[in-house]
Image: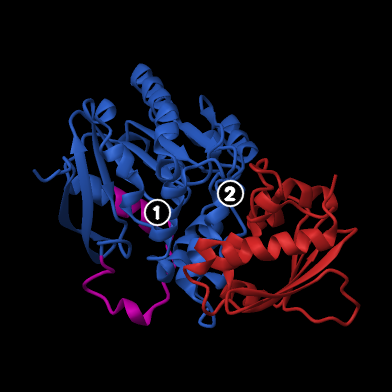
Chain colours: A blue, B red
Protein backbone atom coordinates (compact mmCIF):
# COMPACT_ATOMS: atom_id res chain seq x y z
CA UNK A 1 0.00 0.00 0.00
CA UNK A 2 1.54 3.31 -1.08
CA UNK A 3 2.02 5.91 1.63
CA UNK A 4 0.52 9.20 0.47
CA UNK A 5 1.01 12.50 2.21
CA UNK A 6 -2.09 14.63 2.89
CA UNK A 7 -0.19 17.63 1.49
CA UNK A 8 -1.47 18.86 -1.88
CA UNK A 9 0.49 20.99 -4.36
CA UNK A 10 -1.14 23.43 -6.79
CA UNK A 11 -0.31 26.35 -9.06
CA UNK A 12 -2.06 29.70 -9.17
CA UNK A 13 -1.26 32.58 -11.52
CA UNK A 14 -1.11 36.08 -10.07
CA UNK A 15 -0.14 39.54 -11.28
CA UNK A 16 2.21 41.59 -9.13
CA UNK A 17 3.23 45.08 -10.24
CA UNK A 18 2.76 43.98 -13.86
CA UNK A 19 4.76 40.77 -13.42
CA UNK A 20 2.89 37.55 -14.22
CA UNK A 21 3.83 34.76 -11.83
CA UNK A 22 2.66 31.16 -11.84
CA UNK A 23 3.03 30.34 -8.16
CA UNK A 24 3.40 26.87 -6.68
CA UNK A 25 2.15 26.21 -3.17
CA UNK A 26 1.77 23.27 -0.83
CA UNK A 27 -1.28 23.12 1.41
CA UNK A 28 -2.72 21.02 4.20
CA UNK A 29 -5.06 21.57 7.13
CA UNK A 30 -8.31 23.17 8.17
CA UNK A 31 -9.01 26.35 10.06
CA UNK A 32 -7.09 29.60 10.45
CA UNK A 33 -4.94 30.15 7.35
CA UNK A 34 -1.19 30.43 7.89
CA UNK A 35 1.00 31.63 5.00
CA UNK A 36 4.54 30.28 5.29
CA UNK A 37 7.49 31.95 3.57
CA UNK A 38 10.74 30.04 3.05
CA UNK A 39 14.16 31.62 3.54
CA UNK A 40 16.22 33.41 0.87
CA UNK A 41 17.51 31.20 -1.94
CA UNK A 42 15.36 28.28 -0.82
CA UNK A 43 11.86 26.83 -1.35
CA UNK A 44 8.78 25.58 0.42
CA UNK A 45 10.12 22.15 1.39
CA UNK A 46 11.60 23.89 4.40
CA UNK A 47 8.07 23.68 5.84
CA UNK A 48 7.69 19.91 5.25
CA UNK A 49 7.47 19.13 8.97
CA UNK A 50 4.77 21.68 9.69
CA UNK A 51 2.74 20.70 6.61
CA UNK A 52 2.39 17.16 7.95
CA UNK A 53 2.01 17.96 11.66
CA UNK A 54 -1.53 16.85 12.46
CA UNK A 55 -1.44 18.49 15.88
CA UNK A 56 -1.34 21.85 14.06
CA UNK A 57 -3.10 21.13 10.75
CA UNK A 58 -6.25 20.06 12.61
CA UNK A 59 -6.77 23.72 13.52
CA UNK A 60 -4.72 25.60 10.92
CA UNK A 61 -4.73 25.72 7.12
CA UNK A 62 -1.01 25.68 6.29
CA UNK A 63 -0.03 27.23 2.95
CA UNK A 64 3.68 27.07 2.11
CA UNK A 65 4.41 28.70 -1.24
CA UNK A 66 7.46 29.16 -3.41
CA UNK A 67 8.23 32.83 -3.96
CA UNK A 68 8.60 33.65 -7.66
CA UNK A 69 11.97 32.40 -9.05
CA UNK A 70 12.20 29.77 -6.28
CA UNK A 71 11.43 26.04 -6.32
CA UNK A 72 8.56 25.39 -8.72
CA UNK A 73 7.48 29.04 -9.05
CA UNK A 74 9.06 30.27 -12.26
CA UNK A 75 10.43 33.74 -12.92
CA UNK A 76 7.89 36.16 -14.48
CA UNK A 77 6.35 34.69 -17.61
CA UNK A 78 5.74 38.03 -19.32
CA UNK A 79 9.24 39.51 -19.10
CA UNK A 80 12.70 38.75 -20.43
CA UNK A 81 13.90 38.33 -16.86
CA UNK A 82 17.26 36.92 -17.95
CA UNK A 83 18.21 40.40 -19.20
CA UNK A 84 17.76 42.04 -15.78
CA UNK A 85 19.65 41.57 -12.54
CA UNK A 86 17.25 40.30 -9.89
CA UNK A 87 17.06 42.49 -6.79
CA UNK A 88 14.04 41.91 -4.57
CA UNK A 89 12.52 45.02 -3.01
CA UNK A 90 10.33 45.28 0.08
CA UNK A 91 7.48 46.76 -1.94
CA UNK A 92 7.40 44.02 -4.59
CA UNK A 93 7.81 41.31 -1.97
CA UNK A 94 4.84 42.58 0.06
CA UNK A 95 2.72 43.03 -3.06
CA UNK A 96 3.47 39.42 -4.04
CA UNK A 97 2.32 38.08 -0.68
CA UNK A 98 -0.85 40.18 -0.68
CA UNK A 99 -1.70 39.20 -4.28
CA UNK A 100 -1.23 35.53 -3.42
CA UNK A 101 -3.38 35.83 -0.29
CA UNK A 102 -6.14 37.47 -2.33
CA UNK A 103 -5.89 34.90 -5.13
CA UNK A 104 -6.36 32.11 -2.58
CA UNK A 105 -9.19 34.11 -0.94
CA UNK A 106 -7.60 33.82 2.48
CA UNK A 107 -9.38 35.58 5.36
CA UNK A 108 -6.72 37.62 7.14
CA UNK A 109 -4.12 34.86 7.37
CA UNK A 110 -1.36 34.61 9.91
CA UNK A 111 1.88 35.31 8.09
CA UNK A 112 5.00 33.43 9.16
CA UNK A 113 8.41 33.63 7.52
CA UNK A 114 11.99 32.94 8.44
CA UNK A 115 15.05 35.09 7.79
CA UNK A 116 14.14 37.26 4.79
CA UNK A 117 10.63 35.90 5.32
CA UNK A 118 10.79 37.13 8.89
CA UNK A 119 11.95 40.55 7.83
CA UNK A 120 9.07 40.89 5.36
CA UNK A 121 6.71 39.83 8.15
CA UNK A 122 7.81 42.95 10.02
CA UNK A 123 7.24 45.02 6.87
CA UNK A 124 3.72 43.59 6.52
CA UNK A 125 2.89 44.36 10.14
CA UNK A 126 3.98 47.96 9.59
CA UNK A 127 2.45 48.62 6.17
CA UNK A 128 -0.52 46.22 5.92
CA UNK A 129 -1.68 45.41 9.46
CA UNK A 130 -5.33 44.96 8.49
CA UNK A 131 -4.61 42.28 5.90
CA UNK A 132 -3.09 39.86 8.40
CA UNK A 133 -4.41 38.35 11.63
CA UNK A 134 -0.90 38.34 13.07
CA UNK A 135 2.69 37.87 11.96
CA UNK A 136 5.38 35.52 13.23
CA UNK A 137 8.77 36.88 12.16
CA UNK A 138 11.26 34.05 12.67
CA UNK A 139 14.99 34.86 12.76
CA UNK A 140 14.23 38.50 11.92
CA UNK A 141 15.46 41.94 12.91
CA UNK A 142 14.85 45.58 12.10
CA UNK A 143 18.00 45.59 9.98
CA UNK A 144 20.26 42.73 8.84
CA UNK A 145 23.28 44.04 6.95
CA UNK A 146 26.31 42.09 5.73
CA UNK A 147 24.98 39.19 3.66
CA UNK A 148 24.58 40.81 0.22
CA UNK A 149 27.75 39.18 -1.07
CA UNK A 150 29.16 38.52 -4.55
CA UNK A 151 30.34 35.09 -3.41
CA UNK A 152 26.83 33.65 -3.75
CA UNK A 153 27.06 33.66 -7.54
CA UNK A 154 30.73 34.07 -8.28
CA UNK A 155 31.47 32.49 -11.68
CA UNK A 156 34.81 31.08 -10.52
CA UNK A 157 33.31 29.03 -7.71
CA UNK A 158 30.64 26.33 -7.49
CA UNK A 159 27.76 28.62 -6.53
CA UNK A 160 25.51 25.74 -5.47
CA UNK A 161 28.07 24.55 -2.96
CA UNK A 162 29.01 28.06 -1.85
CA UNK A 163 25.37 28.86 -1.03
CA UNK A 164 24.70 25.50 0.63
CA UNK A 165 27.87 25.36 2.69
CA UNK A 166 27.86 29.13 3.22
CA UNK A 167 24.68 28.81 5.26
CA UNK A 168 25.74 25.55 6.94
CA UNK A 169 26.69 27.09 10.23
CA UNK A 170 23.56 29.14 10.38
CA UNK A 171 22.24 25.85 11.75
CA UNK A 172 22.82 24.52 15.25
CA UNK A 173 25.24 21.60 15.61
CA UNK A 174 22.63 19.80 17.73
CA UNK A 175 20.11 19.71 14.87
CA UNK A 176 19.78 16.26 13.28
CA UNK A 177 22.26 15.46 10.50
CA UNK A 178 19.51 14.39 8.09
CA UNK A 179 17.62 17.66 8.47
CA UNK A 180 20.75 19.79 8.22
CA UNK A 181 21.82 18.00 5.06
CA UNK A 182 18.31 18.29 3.58
CA UNK A 183 18.51 22.02 4.20
CA UNK A 184 21.96 22.01 2.59
CA UNK A 185 20.42 20.15 -0.36
CA UNK A 186 17.67 22.77 -0.76
CA UNK A 187 20.29 25.51 -0.67
CA UNK A 188 22.23 23.89 -3.49
CA UNK A 189 19.20 24.52 -5.72
CA UNK A 190 18.72 28.28 -5.43
CA UNK A 191 22.07 29.91 -5.95
CA UNK A 192 21.00 32.13 -8.87
CA UNK A 193 18.40 33.95 -6.76
CA UNK A 194 20.07 33.92 -3.37
CA UNK A 195 21.97 37.16 -3.84
CA UNK A 196 18.93 38.94 -5.29
CA UNK A 197 16.86 37.85 -2.30
CA UNK A 198 19.55 39.19 -0.02
CA UNK A 199 19.25 42.59 -1.62
CA UNK A 200 15.99 42.80 0.28
CA UNK A 201 17.38 41.10 3.39
CA UNK A 202 20.50 43.19 3.86
CA UNK A 203 19.90 46.37 1.82
CA UNK A 204 16.27 47.33 1.19
CA UNK A 205 14.90 46.10 4.52
CA UNK A 206 15.65 48.76 7.10
CA UNK A 207 13.02 49.51 9.74
CA UNK A 208 15.31 51.35 12.12
CA UNK A 209 13.37 54.20 13.66
CA UNK A 210 10.03 52.89 12.34
CA UNK A 211 9.18 50.01 14.67
CA UNK A 212 7.21 52.17 17.09
CA UNK A 213 4.66 52.68 14.29
CA UNK A 214 3.69 49.01 14.21
CA UNK A 215 0.22 48.64 15.71
CA UNK A 216 0.10 45.25 17.43
CA UNK A 217 -3.54 45.74 18.41
CA UNK A 218 -4.37 45.43 14.72
CA UNK A 219 -1.66 42.91 13.91
CA UNK A 220 0.11 41.11 16.78
CA UNK A 221 3.84 40.47 16.29
CA UNK A 222 5.42 37.34 17.83
CA UNK A 223 9.15 37.18 17.07
CA UNK A 224 11.20 34.01 17.52
CA UNK A 225 14.95 33.50 17.10
CA UNK A 226 17.30 30.58 17.71
CA UNK A 227 20.37 30.88 19.90
CA UNK A 228 22.68 29.61 17.11
CA UNK A 229 21.65 32.27 14.59
CA UNK A 230 24.70 34.43 13.86
CA UNK A 231 23.00 36.61 11.25
CA UNK A 232 20.17 37.82 13.44
CA UNK A 233 21.42 36.74 16.85
CA UNK A 234 18.95 36.62 19.74
CA UNK A 235 19.94 40.06 21.00
CA UNK A 236 19.12 41.60 17.59
CA UNK A 237 15.62 40.11 17.56
CA UNK A 238 15.01 40.94 21.20
CA UNK A 239 16.09 44.53 20.59
CA UNK A 240 13.70 44.70 17.62
CA UNK A 241 10.74 43.26 19.55
CA UNK A 242 11.39 45.64 22.43
CA UNK A 243 10.92 48.64 20.14
CA UNK A 244 7.53 47.39 18.89
CA UNK A 245 4.75 48.43 21.30
CA UNK A 246 3.23 45.14 22.44
CA UNK A 247 5.80 43.11 20.50
CA UNK A 248 6.66 39.67 21.89
CA UNK A 249 10.00 37.89 21.71
CA UNK A 250 10.50 34.15 22.19
CA UNK A 251 14.06 32.81 22.32
CA UNK A 252 14.51 29.31 20.91
CA UNK A 253 17.28 27.31 22.59
CA UNK A 254 19.70 25.12 20.64
CA UNK A 255 18.42 25.88 17.17
CA UNK A 256 19.59 28.09 14.32
CA UNK A 257 18.45 30.26 11.43
CA UNK A 258 16.32 27.59 9.66
CA UNK A 259 14.39 26.20 12.63
CA UNK A 260 11.43 24.77 10.71
CA UNK A 261 13.78 22.91 8.39
CA UNK A 262 16.75 21.97 10.58
CA UNK A 263 14.83 20.68 13.61
CA UNK A 264 11.05 20.81 13.21
CA UNK A 265 10.10 18.90 16.41
CA UNK A 266 11.95 21.48 18.51
CA UNK A 267 10.62 24.40 16.47
CA UNK A 268 7.06 23.11 16.88
CA UNK A 269 7.28 23.57 20.65
CA UNK A 270 7.91 27.28 20.20
CA UNK A 271 5.51 27.66 17.29
CA UNK A 272 2.63 26.27 19.35
CA UNK A 273 3.33 28.85 22.01
CA UNK A 274 3.27 31.62 19.38
CA UNK A 275 -0.02 30.32 17.98
CA UNK A 276 -1.48 30.14 21.49
CA UNK A 277 -0.60 33.78 22.10
CA UNK A 278 -2.11 34.81 18.76
CA UNK A 279 -5.27 32.84 19.55
CA UNK A 280 -5.59 34.74 22.83
CA UNK A 281 -5.13 38.12 21.19
CA UNK A 282 -7.32 37.75 18.12
CA UNK B 1 45.74 19.43 28.27
CA UNK B 2 46.41 20.28 24.62
CA UNK B 3 47.58 17.61 22.22
CA UNK B 4 51.22 17.62 21.09
CA UNK B 5 51.08 19.25 17.67
CA UNK B 6 52.76 16.33 15.88
CA UNK B 7 50.33 13.86 17.44
CA UNK B 8 47.51 16.18 16.51
CA UNK B 9 48.71 16.32 12.90
CA UNK B 10 48.66 12.54 12.60
CA UNK B 11 45.19 12.28 14.11
CA UNK B 12 43.79 15.11 12.01
CA UNK B 13 45.25 13.74 8.79
CA UNK B 14 43.81 10.29 9.49
CA UNK B 15 40.41 11.71 10.44
CA UNK B 16 40.33 13.72 7.21
CA UNK B 17 41.33 10.86 4.98
CA UNK B 18 38.81 8.49 6.60
CA UNK B 19 35.88 10.89 6.58
CA UNK B 20 33.09 9.56 4.33
CA UNK B 21 31.45 12.97 3.78
CA UNK B 22 34.68 14.39 2.40
CA UNK B 23 35.33 11.14 0.54
CA UNK B 24 31.97 11.37 -1.21
CA UNK B 25 33.08 14.50 -3.09
CA UNK B 26 36.82 14.55 -2.60
CA UNK B 27 38.16 14.28 -6.12
CA UNK B 28 39.00 17.95 -6.68
CA UNK B 29 39.45 19.08 -3.08
CA UNK B 30 42.84 20.69 -3.49
CA UNK B 31 44.04 23.72 -1.51
CA UNK B 32 46.54 24.81 1.12
CA UNK B 33 45.45 26.68 4.22
CA UNK B 34 46.97 28.14 7.36
CA UNK B 35 45.35 27.82 10.76
CA UNK B 36 46.83 30.43 13.08
CA UNK B 37 45.91 29.51 16.65
CA UNK B 38 47.99 32.22 18.26
CA UNK B 39 50.57 30.05 20.03
CA UNK B 40 50.59 27.47 17.24
CA UNK B 41 50.43 27.75 13.47
CA UNK B 42 49.67 24.89 11.10
CA UNK B 43 49.62 24.66 7.30
CA UNK B 44 47.48 21.88 5.84
CA UNK B 45 48.01 20.91 2.22
CA UNK B 46 45.13 18.99 0.61
CA UNK B 47 45.50 17.29 -2.78
CA UNK B 48 42.56 15.57 -4.47
CA UNK B 49 40.74 15.08 -1.18
CA UNK B 50 43.64 13.59 0.75
CA UNK B 51 45.99 15.13 3.28
CA UNK B 52 49.23 15.60 1.37
CA UNK B 53 51.22 17.36 4.12
CA UNK B 54 50.65 19.03 7.51
CA UNK B 55 53.35 21.54 8.32
CA UNK B 56 53.44 22.02 12.09
CA UNK B 57 56.30 24.51 12.08
CA UNK B 58 55.55 27.02 9.30
CA UNK B 59 58.29 29.47 8.43
CA UNK B 60 57.67 33.08 7.33
CA UNK B 61 57.72 32.41 3.60
CA UNK B 62 55.86 29.08 3.58
CA UNK B 63 53.00 29.51 1.15
CA UNK B 64 49.29 28.93 1.56
CA UNK B 65 46.09 30.00 -0.21
CA UNK B 66 44.04 31.31 2.68
CA UNK B 67 44.19 31.54 6.45
CA UNK B 68 41.97 31.36 9.52
CA UNK B 69 43.30 33.37 12.46
CA UNK B 70 41.85 33.49 15.97
CA UNK B 71 42.89 33.34 19.59
CA UNK B 72 43.75 30.01 21.26
CA UNK B 73 40.58 30.34 23.35
CA UNK B 74 38.46 30.54 20.20
CA UNK B 75 40.14 27.48 18.69
CA UNK B 76 39.47 25.57 21.89
CA UNK B 77 35.81 26.54 21.58
CA UNK B 78 35.79 25.26 17.98
CA UNK B 79 37.00 21.90 19.27
CA UNK B 80 34.22 21.29 21.79
CA UNK B 81 32.00 18.34 20.78
CA UNK B 82 29.09 20.79 20.67
CA UNK B 83 30.47 24.33 20.40
CA UNK B 84 28.68 27.20 22.04
CA UNK B 85 26.69 29.57 19.80
CA UNK B 86 28.86 31.71 17.51
CA UNK B 87 31.79 29.28 17.86
CA UNK B 88 30.02 26.66 15.76
CA UNK B 89 31.51 27.56 12.39
CA UNK B 90 33.85 29.77 10.42
CA UNK B 91 31.06 32.11 9.29
CA UNK B 92 29.54 32.54 12.73
CA UNK B 93 32.91 33.11 14.38
CA UNK B 94 34.01 35.58 11.71
CA UNK B 95 30.73 37.53 11.99
CA UNK B 96 30.43 37.46 15.80
CA UNK B 97 33.78 36.48 17.36
CA UNK B 98 37.49 37.10 16.72
CA UNK B 99 38.05 34.80 13.73
CA UNK B 100 39.68 36.48 10.73
CA UNK B 101 39.60 34.90 7.28
CA UNK B 102 42.45 36.15 5.13
CA UNK B 103 44.27 35.43 1.88
CA UNK B 104 42.72 34.18 -1.34
CA UNK B 105 39.15 33.70 -0.16
CA UNK B 106 38.11 32.60 -3.64
CA UNK B 107 40.08 29.38 -3.14
CA UNK B 108 38.25 28.83 0.14
CA UNK B 109 34.92 29.35 -1.62
CA UNK B 110 35.90 26.93 -4.39
CA UNK B 111 36.51 24.28 -1.75
CA UNK B 112 33.93 25.38 0.80
CA UNK B 113 31.90 22.18 1.10
CA UNK B 114 34.81 19.96 2.01
CA UNK B 115 36.69 22.61 3.96
CA UNK B 116 33.63 23.14 6.17
CA UNK B 117 33.32 19.42 6.85
CA UNK B 118 37.04 19.15 7.54
CA UNK B 119 36.99 22.12 9.92
CA UNK B 120 34.29 20.41 11.98
CA UNK B 121 36.56 17.39 12.45
CA UNK B 122 38.21 19.50 15.14
CA UNK B 123 35.21 18.56 17.31
CA UNK B 124 36.44 14.95 17.22
CA UNK B 125 40.20 15.46 17.06
CA UNK B 126 40.66 18.53 19.29
CA UNK B 127 43.22 21.33 18.82
CA UNK B 128 46.90 21.57 19.79
CA UNK B 129 46.53 24.74 21.87
Residue shown at the point (47%, 40%) measured from the top left: A138
Q: Which of the chains bears the disc numbered 1? A: A
Q: Which residues are magenta?
A: A74-97
- Between A26 and A264, the one lying in front of the other is A264
Residue matched to label 1? A182
Q: Is residue B41 visible?
A: yes
Element on which disc 1 rests: helix
Residue A76 forms part of the magenta stretch: yes
Quadrant in the picture for residue A32: top left
**Residue sitting nearer the eye, B30 or A126:** B30
Residue A94, image x and y in percent? 36, 51
Q: Is tag 2's residue or tag 1's residue first in the polypeptide sequence?
A: 2
- Residue B113: image tag: none
Secondary structure under the numbered disc 2 in the rendered image: loop
Q: What is the tally of numbered marks visible in this picture?
A: 2
Instruction: Pick the residue in front: B45 or A238.
Output: B45
Quarter of the picture holding the C terminus of chain A = top left
Residue at point 76%, 57% (across, down): B99
**Quadrant into which the N terminus of chain A falls:** top left
State whether residue A197 is above or below residue A274. below
Query: Left or right: A103 with respect to A194?
Result: left
Disc 2 designates what residue? A143
Mark 2 to mark 1 CA distance (whole Å): 28 Å
Residue B115: say if magenta. Answer: no
Labels 2 and 1 touching (C-beta < 8 A): no
Quarter where residue A272 is shown? top left
Q: Is residue B101 left or right of residue A263?
A: right
Q: Is residue B48 left or right of residue A7?
A: right
Amino acid sequence: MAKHSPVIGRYVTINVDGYEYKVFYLRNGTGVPVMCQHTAGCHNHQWRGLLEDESITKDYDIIAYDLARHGKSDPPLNREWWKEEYTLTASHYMNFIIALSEALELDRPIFMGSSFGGNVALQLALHHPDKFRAVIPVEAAEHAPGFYLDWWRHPHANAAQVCASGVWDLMAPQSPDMDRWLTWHYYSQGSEVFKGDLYFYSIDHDLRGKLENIDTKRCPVIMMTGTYDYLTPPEATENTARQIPGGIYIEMEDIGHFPMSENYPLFAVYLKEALRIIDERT
Amino acid sequence: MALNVRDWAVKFGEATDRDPTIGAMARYYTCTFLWDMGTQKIIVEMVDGKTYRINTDPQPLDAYDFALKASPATWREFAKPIPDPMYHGIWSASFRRDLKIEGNILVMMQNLRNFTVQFELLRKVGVPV
